[in-house]
Amino acid sequence: MTDTDLSTARRRRALELQDRHVATHGETVISFRGHSMAPTLRNDDQLRVRHVSVGDLVPGDVVVFTADAHTVVHRLLYVSRAGSTAPYLRTKGDNATACDPPVEPAALFGRVSCVVRGSKEITLSGRRWRAGALAIVALSLTEHTATAILRTVQKRRSGKEHAETRARHRVRTWRSRLRGMLLHLFLGLAGR
């Protein structure tokens, strides 16, 4: 077994133990690292995660799931319950340009109920939080659609590589301006 295989096996075991803890105790605390949820979440934020079933989730929830033996914290856009196919979660980081691949319900770890940032506790519930979360979901779905349309249009006009770059830049600029305004208005997290 190589060092990489051993590291992956240890990571999977740690995730299994964490899953068991949440299932038994209902809640756990994890430390957030990364920029995919900026500015909503920051490095070293402590997240209280509650075990929930897929049926308890609503669009806008910040969820924790496993993907490729990694713990991922992203916003839920929707749960697909279409026809005969198995349900899946559609998620996206607030600061990401693309949606995540579909997430199987079995990969769901839980929903973030509270963010502890320094001495402040930010509860992810209430009218302001829900309104802001739904606005971000609407923005994310609009962004996803706009990016696809821009790529299609620009591929017809010019070379493939340049179209991708220009589409990403336009959407990124539009997204960051709108997201900043939404976070400032609805969530009150910008600048904290």
Image: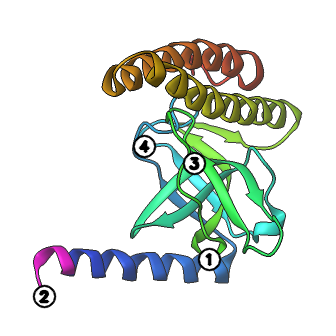
Q: CA distance from mark 4 to mark 2?
A: 33 Å
Q: Which mark is residue 1?
A: 2
Which residues, given as a range, are shown in magenta? 1-5
Which residue is drawn at the image coordinates 62% and 50% (left, top)? 91
Q: Are marks 1 and 4 in contact (CB under 8 Å)?
A: no
Q: Residues within 10 Å of mark 2 (few under 14, many from 20)?
A: few
In the displayed structure, 113 sits above or below 41; it is below
Q: Residues within 10 Å of mark 3 (few under 14, many from 20)?
A: many
Q: Which mark is residue 44?
A: 4
What kind of element bears circle 2? loop
Which residue carries the number 3 mark?
A: 74
Give the residue furthest to the left. 2
Precedes in sequence: disc 3 or disc 4: 4
Task: Measuring from the top left, give residue 118's x and y in whole percent.
Answer: 51, 37
Which residue carries the number 1 mark?
A: 106
Q: Quadrant of residue 129?
A: top right
